[in-house]
Image: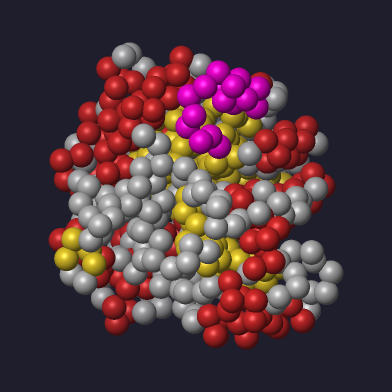
């Protein structure tokens, strides 16, 4: 794409206005296809930016009135211009810390195949006290402590599932974590045990904390370093704002420091992690964390993140279901688990409302979705006007889908997952059956019922590239395994619907729709210039290959 940037003088413009009718712009974009994402969009080809805000949106002729001697002018040759994209559910800080080490790249591997790669990593790492392996594809993966002991016996070894809900450790790691046959299962997790009652080394959800709690902690300097390195990667795919989900105190402190140093090049809304324990001590902790974030237009900490359940894939199966998981084709003994008892969730959300917090809930199974909706409905009935949202929503009972619009609960969907693969098919279909599988990732059903759908990635579980998620949402096809066909094509969305999901809808989920999410006068000049022009004929494959030519944050260019 050819983008021509000029610094034009008044003489070069023919001195159209000896006395401009308004202040001059810092940046003017001309000749574009502006997708404003406003509710009543008008055709626009140009915009002007001043002091980090959009000062004008309209046609080229009037935009030239904003050009002065120091104005940067971009001619974008008809290519599409979007508001900065917004990820409504990402784990950027923790995901960034996990990069750069030993990774299995989410490949489908047996423990024997994985062991070869892990040994190669160990051979290159003589210094780490803990050996951590990330991106382990957990769908159907099986390993026990004895198999991991054969790989590494002396140092603690921790395999971290890509889903963030599963892990495998060797005997040394179990020893350091203090996990014995007497160790009880955490309330929101599971220690898998053998027939003798001994821990096998497979840990789920809350049980992972027993291990991570004794691992080396990254320094504050390391946290800043990885954030600085990862933010440009977001900008390269057009993301300028996001919800940092499930955030701990150390991550909050890192963002505060980055903002103080004026090195934060994104608008970050923090969702504080909580177990959902409704006690004065827990809310005092949450309010203290919120108070630690100074007033800053880029940084907010006004959400709480809760986990209603876990994940659906075998062998974990901790997503809470209304009907049992199948075993050999028949209903089995397990429906998964609600991590917070329904009455406790309802009272917690009522207290969060009283203390001025919005709430964002992880729910994968249909029972978890119903529990979250019930709790939000109770808060609405009591007069709450807070922002409420549910993330993931792999399965929703049909009766509950209209409740999203009724209770003003926004859906944060990770639609890169809505493709047939070893997660959604191999590790799910045999255990929930065809009827429930046909209702997974119900994006179209939610929109048809009036729900607001926002886009998100859940990185570092999967790619944070919004265009990959948009393409999958449009096609429901796995581009790496096209022979698998589609996953519930009736739930596909259009390109326009997905652009809205990553702009104005995501801005609404964050409570920032007055600031970002559309190209409108007075909003932040977070702008993406694509490498081509979009049309009604743009295919999913073409969307998957989209790349921003330029990304601007507050009017400043943040891509090379």
Magenta part of the protein: which range?
A: 273-290
Q: Quadrant of residue 449?
A: top left
Does 165 sit left or right of 411 as displayed?
right
Residue 236 percent coordinates (x, y): 61, 57
The x and y percentages for residue 457 are 47, 53
Viewport quadrant of the N terminus: bottom right
> In the figure, is residue 316 to the left or right of 264?
left
Vertical relation: 163 (above or below) 303: below
To which quarter of the image does residue 339 belong? top left
**In the image, residue 286 lies in the stretch drawn in magenta:** yes
Is residue 266 shown left or right of residue 246?
Answer: right
Residue for point 26% across, 76% down: 485
Q: Is 515 included in the stretch rendered in magenta?
A: no
Indicate the position of residue 41 as horizontal and vertical percent values. Answer: 35, 37
Q: Main secondary structure of the magenta part?
A: helix
Vertical relation: 205 (above or below) 121: above
Does the image show residue 10? no
Q: Residue at x 41, y 61 (%)?
A: 316
The picture places residue 313, in percent across and down from the top left corner, at 37, 63
Q: How is the image coloured?
A: secondary structure
State whether residue 279 is above or below residue 153.
above
In the image, what residue occupies the spot 75% across and 69% down? 155
Q: Look at 34% across and 69% down and name the residue there.
A: 427
> Front-most of 160 and 28?
160
In-front residue for pair 462/437: 437
Q: Can residue 322 be seen in the rendering of this structure?
A: yes
């Amino acid at each position: 794409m050819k983008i021509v940037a000029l610094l034009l003088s008044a003489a070069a413009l023919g001195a159209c206005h000896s006395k401009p009718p308004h202040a001059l712009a810092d940046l003017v974009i001309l000749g574009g296809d502006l997708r404003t994402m406003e509710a009543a969009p008008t055709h626009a080809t140009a915009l002007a930016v001043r002091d980090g805000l959009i000062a004008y949106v309209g046609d080229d002729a009037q935009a030239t009135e904003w050009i002065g001697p120091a104005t940067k002018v971009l001619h974008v040759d008809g290519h599409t211009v979007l508001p900065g994209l917004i990820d409504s559910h990402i784990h950027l800080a923790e995901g960034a810390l996990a990069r750069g080490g030993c990774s299995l790249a989410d490949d489908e591997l047996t423990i024997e195949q994985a062991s070869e790669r892990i040994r190669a990593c160990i051979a290159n790492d003589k210094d780490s006290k803990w050996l951590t392996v990330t991106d382990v594809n957990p769908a159907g993966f099986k390993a026990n402590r004895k198999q991991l002991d054969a790989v590494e016996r002396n140092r603690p070894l921790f395999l971290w599932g890509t889903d963030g809900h599963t892990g495998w450790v060797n005997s040394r790691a179990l020893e350091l974590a203090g996990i014995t046959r007497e160790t009880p299962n955490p309330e929101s997790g599971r220690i898998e045990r053998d027939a003798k009652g001994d821990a096998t080394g497979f840990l789920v959800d809350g049980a992972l904390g027993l291990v991570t709690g004794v691992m080396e902690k990254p320094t504050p300097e390391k946290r800043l370093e990885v954030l600085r390195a990862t933010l440009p990667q977001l900008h390269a795919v057009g993301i300028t704002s996001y919800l940092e989900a499930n955030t701990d105190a150390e991550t909050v402190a890192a963002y505060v420091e980055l903002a103080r140093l004026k090195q934060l090049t994104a608008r970050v809304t923090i969702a504080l992690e909580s177990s959902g324990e409704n006690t004065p001590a827990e809310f005092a902790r949450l309010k203290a964390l919120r108070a630690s974030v100074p007033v800053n237009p880029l940084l907010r900490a006004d959400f709480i993140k809760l986990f209603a359940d876990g994940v659906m894939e075998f062998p974990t199966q901790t997503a809470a279901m209304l009907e049992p998981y199948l075993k050999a084709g028949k209903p089995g003994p397990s429906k998964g688990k609600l991590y917070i008892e329904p009455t406790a969730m309802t009272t917690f959300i009522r207290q969060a409302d009283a203390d001025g917090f919005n709430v964002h809930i992880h729910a994968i199974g249909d029972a978890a979705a119903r529990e979250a909706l019930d709790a939000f409905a109770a808060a609405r009935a009591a007069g709450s006007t807070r922002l409420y949202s549910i993330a993931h929503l792999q399965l929703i009972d049909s009766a509950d889908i209209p409740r999203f619009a009724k209770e003003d609960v926004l859906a944060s969907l990770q639609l890169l997952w809505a493709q047939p693969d070893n997660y959604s098919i191999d590790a799910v279909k045999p255990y929930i059956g065809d009827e429930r599988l046909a209702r997974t990732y119900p994006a179209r059903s939610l929109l048809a019922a009036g729900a607001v759908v926002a886009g998100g990635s859940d990185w570092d579980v999967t790619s944070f590239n919004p265009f990959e998620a948009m393409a999958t949402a449009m096609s429901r096809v796995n581009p790496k395994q096209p022979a698998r066909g589609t996953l519930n094509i009736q739930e596909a969305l259009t390109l326009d619907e997905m652009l809205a999901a990553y702009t104005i809808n995501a801005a609404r989920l964050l409570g920032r729709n007055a600031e970002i999410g559309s190209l409108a006068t007075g909003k932040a000049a977070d702008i993406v210039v694509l490498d081509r022009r979009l049309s009604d004929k743009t295919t999913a494959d073409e969307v998957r290959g989209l790349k921003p030519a330029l990304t601007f944050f507050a009017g400043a260019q943040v891509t090379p």
